[in-house]
Image (cartoon, rainbow, N blue to C red):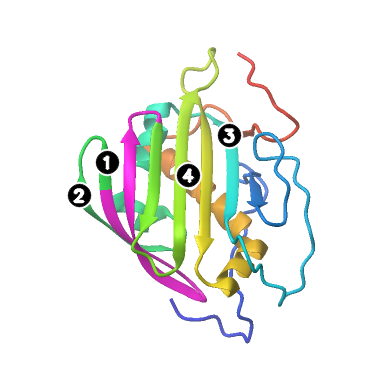
Amino acid sequence: MALPKTRSVFPRILFPRSGFFSFQGHYVNRQADEIHGHCHDLRYQKRSFLDFPKQNRTRKYCGRQLVGYTMEQMFEVVSDVENYYKFVPWCKKSVVLLKTPARLKADLIVGFPPINESYTSNVTLIKPHLVKAECTDGKLFHHMLTQWRFSPGLKREQQSCVVDFQITFEFRSAFHSHLSNLFFDQVARQMEGAFIREVGKRYGPATMQPRNLLLNNHMIKS
């Protein structure tokens, strides 16, 4: 992907509009924020642009949604790694090298200015409950763990489930690590929305609009 025609070093990111697929998870900077409970009640510290973190660069994002699709439908899309390049933002290539019912191994390339990097992902599959991907052999990350959990939704609506999405990562570069403070929460939200849209393309309209279960301590009511 060509660099944008501007002097800025920041990626050009199209943030999601508010509406059906606008997610509001929580982005956690473990060095700057204090974590209380389940990925919320965050306390932020301000840093100047050049004040890069010097120690722990681990970043974490958590999202929890009630969606109008089944666990099986969500699992099928999230586990379809070989087609990520077709619908996952900034995924330029996704090639599955090995696949069994319980795991798969894939090579992926992600790219958005100023980042364009390939890495290997080892994916654990527990149908229809879990898809967990761990990054290895990458120059961009020290580590990256992406985890999707699916659990039953509303009793009165069989075509529904709760989706827990979590991504934890650490860049090797201090510069990329600092950039992640500024935009990666938006990237993670777009990723969540992209998977929901893809489920809609494959299985039709959802039975309900997604509900953010991390805001205002929402409880699932049958």
Number of marks present in the image shown: 4
In terms of sequence position, does the residue under pointer 1 or pointer 3 come before the other?
3
Q: What separation in Å lies between label 3 and label 2 (alpha carbons)?
A: 30 Å
Q: What separation in Å lies between label 3 and label 4 (alpha carbons)?
A: 14 Å
Q: Is 175 or 162 nearer to us in this picture?
A: 175
Q: What separation in Å lies between label 1 and label 4 (alpha carbons)?
A: 24 Å
Q: Does the magenta segment cover residue 128?
A: yes
Q: Nearer the viewer, mark 3 or mark 4?
A: 3
Are the residues flagged by discs 1 and 2 in contact, CB closer than 8 Å? Answer: yes
**Residue 92 location (% of width, % of height):** 37, 65
Q: Which residue is mark 4?
A: 197
Q: Nearer the viewer, mark 1 or mark 4?
A: 1
Q: Which residue is mark 2?
A: 98
Residue at 42% across / 28% down in the picture? 71
Q: Nearer the viewer, mark 3 or mark 2?
A: 2
Q: Amino acid at mark 4?
A: Arg
Q: Is residue 170 above or below residue 66?
A: below
Q: Amino acid at mark 1?
A: Arg
> For the magenta stretch, what is the residue range?
105-129
Q: Which residue is mark 1?
A: 103
Q: Which residue is mark 3?
A: 65
Q: What separation in Å lies between label 1 and label 3 (alpha carbons)?
A: 25 Å
Callout 3: helix, strand or loop? strand
Are the residues flagged by discs 1 and 4 in contact, CB closer than 8 Å? Answer: no
**Residue 82 location (% of width, % of height):** 28, 52
